[in-house]
C-alpha cells in the first residue's frame, strides 16, 4: 500500500490544494493523469524564459518518462536549454534585481552578461561556444543546398556535443532528452531569438543561405501530419500551455486549419491547460479565456479546460513531479486519489 511518503508531491497536492489556483492545479494534474491513462498523448507549448529558469530539471525526466509527446517552444527556449548545458557554471544570479539601478545593469552589460530577470546568460561561454559549433553546420548546409527545420540543427548539435563540453547536468537538459527521443518539435517565430539574429548576420554577409532553414509555414505543414498521428489513439492529444504568444497560438491552430482549410477529419484537442500570470485583457492571446477558443474551433465545449493563474516556475515542477511519482507507483497514486474522494 502506498503512503504519502512514497508519493510526497501528489500527497501534498491532494491534502493542501483545495481552492482557487491551487484547486485548478490539482484538477489539471488529475485530468492530465486521466488523459494519459486513457491512452492519450500530451503536446506542450512553452513560452517565457523557462529554459533559463531551469525547468529542464523536471521537464527532461518527464520527456524520458513519456509524459509529453511533442513541444512548441520559442527560439529562445530552444537555445537557452543548450546554453544551460554548455555554460551552467558561468551563469550569475541576481536575487536583488528588483532594486537595480540603470548603472547596475550597465555594469552587468560590461561583463557581457545578458540578464533574464534574476539570472543571466554569459555571452562568451554560451553564445560564442554554440556559435562555434552551429555555424559550420549552417555553412555545410549552404554548400550542399540542404534544408532543415530550425530545431533539427539544434538536435544534431546537442547530440554531437562531447561530454567534455557538458558544463551543466545532461540529465537536466530538456533539449537533449527531446533530441534523443526525436520528439516532434515546433519552433514558431524562431527568427526572434539570439541565434535567429546570428543566423541573419551570416546570411547578410553571404556566408550562409537563408533557404537552408525551412519556414514557419513548413513547420505547420509538418505539424499537420504529426498532429494526426499523435491524436490517433486513446483519448487523443491534449494541449498543455505555459504562457501565451506564438508558442501557444501557432500549434493550437492546427485543428481548425486541418478542419476548415484542408477539409480533413480531425479529432479536437482532448485536454487543455494554460499556466499564465497574464490577466484577461482586450485582444491578448495570453489573457484569452479557454472558452474564446471554442469560437475558433480550437477547443470544444466538452474539452476539459483549466487555467492556473500563477507562476509557471512554481507550478510546472509540482505538476511534473507529481506525475512522475504517479507513473512510478500507479496503484499507490490511484489509492491516494480515491482516499481524497477524487
Image: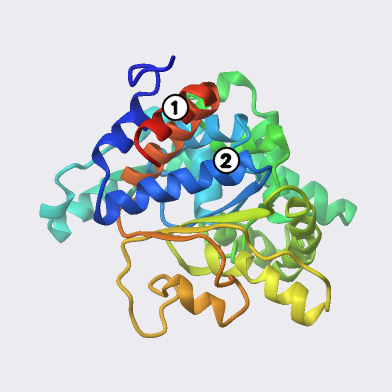
Q: Position of residue 142 (x, y in %)?
A: 81, 55
Marks 1 and 2: in contact by CB < 8 Å? no
Residue 53, horizontal then vertical, whole percent:
37, 43
- Identify the residue at image location x=66%, y=59%: 202
Question: Which mark sits nearer the N-terminus, 2 or 1?
Answer: 2
Residue 281: where, in percent of width, then height?
33, 80
Question: In the picture, residue 288 is in which quadrant?
Answer: bottom left
Name the one closer to the observer, 28 or 90. Answer: 28
Residue 188: tell me if it is visible.
yes
In this view, the residue in front, 112 or 8, is: 8
| Helix, strand or loop at mark 1 | helix
Mark 1 residue crowding within 10 angstroms, few (<14) / some (14–19) / many (20+): some
Residue 335 shows which numbered tag?
1
Secondary structure found at label 2 = helix
Taking the view exactly as shown, the residue that stands out farthest to the right is 144
Residue projecting furthest to the bottom: 282
Q: Quadrant of the C terminus?
A: top left
Q: Nearer the viewer, residue 265 or 119?
A: 265
Where does the N terminus fall, quadrant-wise?
top left
Q: Dot 2, how many residues are within 10 Å of its Cα: few (below 14), some (14-19), or many (20+)?
A: many
Q: Where 2 falls versus 274 (above or below)?
A: above
Is residue 112 visible to the viewer in this orientation of the structure? no
Q: Quadrant of residue 170 in the image?
A: top right
Q: Residue at x 49, y 39 (%)?
A: 83
Q: Which residue is mark 2?
A: 130
x, y (%) of residue 71? 61, 50
Q: With 111 as the anchor, is 304 left or right in this view?
A: right
| Image point (76%, 81%), residue name | 260
**Total numbered circles:** 2
Q: Nearer the viewer, mark 2 or mark 1?
A: 1
Amino acid at each position: 500500500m502506498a503512503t504519502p511518503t512514497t508519493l510526497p508531491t501528489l500527497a501534498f497536492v491532494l491534502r493542501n490544494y483545495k481552492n482557487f489556483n491551487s484547486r485548478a492545479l490539482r484538477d489539471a494534474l488529475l485530468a492530465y493523469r486521466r488523459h494519459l491513462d486513457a491512452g492519450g498523448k500530451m503536446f506542450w507549448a512553452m513560452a517565457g524564459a523557462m529554459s533559463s529558469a531551469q525547468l529542464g530539471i523536471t521537464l527532461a525526466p518527464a520527456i524520458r518518462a513519456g509524459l509529453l509527446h511533442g513541444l512548441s517552444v520559442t527560439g529562445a527556449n530552444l537555445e537557452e536549454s543548450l546554453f544551460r548545458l554548455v555554460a551552467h557554471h558561468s551563469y550569475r544570479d541576481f536575487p536583488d534585481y528588483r532594486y537595480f539601478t540603470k548603472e547596475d545593469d550597465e555594469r552587468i552589460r560590461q561583463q557581457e552578461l545578458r540578464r533574464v530577470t534574476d539570472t543571466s546568460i554569459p555571452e562568451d561561454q554560451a553564445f560564442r561556444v554554440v556559435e562555434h559549433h552551429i555555424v559550420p553546420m549552417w555553412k555545410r548546409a549552404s554548400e550542399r543546398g540542404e534544408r532543415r527545420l530550425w530545431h533539427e540543427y539544434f538536435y544534431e548539435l546537442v547530440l554531437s556535443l562531447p561530454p567534455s563540453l557538458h558544463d551543466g547536468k545532461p540529465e537536466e537538459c530538456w533539449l537533449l532528452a527531446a533530441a534523443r527521443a526525436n520528439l516532434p518539435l515546433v519552433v514558431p517565430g524562431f527568427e526572434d531569438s539570439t541565434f535567429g539574429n546570428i543566423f541573419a548576420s551570416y546570411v547578410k554577409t553571404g556566408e550562409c543561405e537563408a533557404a537552408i532553414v525551412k519556414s514557419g509555414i513548413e513547420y505547420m505543414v509538418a505539424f499537420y501530419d504529426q498532429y494526426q498521428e499523435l491524436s490517433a489513439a486513446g483519448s487523443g492529444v491534449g494541449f498543455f500551455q505555459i504562457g501565451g504568444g506564438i508558442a501557444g497560438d501557432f500549434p493550437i491552430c492546427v485543428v481548425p486549419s486541418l478542419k476548415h482549410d484542408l477539409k480533413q477529419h480531425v479529432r479536437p484537442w482532448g485536454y487543455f491547460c494554460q499556466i499564465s500570470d497574464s490577466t484577461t485583457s482586450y485582444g491578448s492571446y495570453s489573457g484569452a479565456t479557454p472558452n474564446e477558443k471554442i469560437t475558433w474551433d480550437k477547443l470544444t465545449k466538452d474539452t476539459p479546460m483549466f487555467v492556473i493563474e500563477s507562476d509557471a516556475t512554481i507550478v510546472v515542477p509540482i505538476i511534473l513531479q507529481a506525475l512522475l511519482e504517479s507513473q512510478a507507483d500507479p496503484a499507490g497514486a490511484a489509492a491516494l486519489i480515491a482516499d481524497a474522494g477524487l
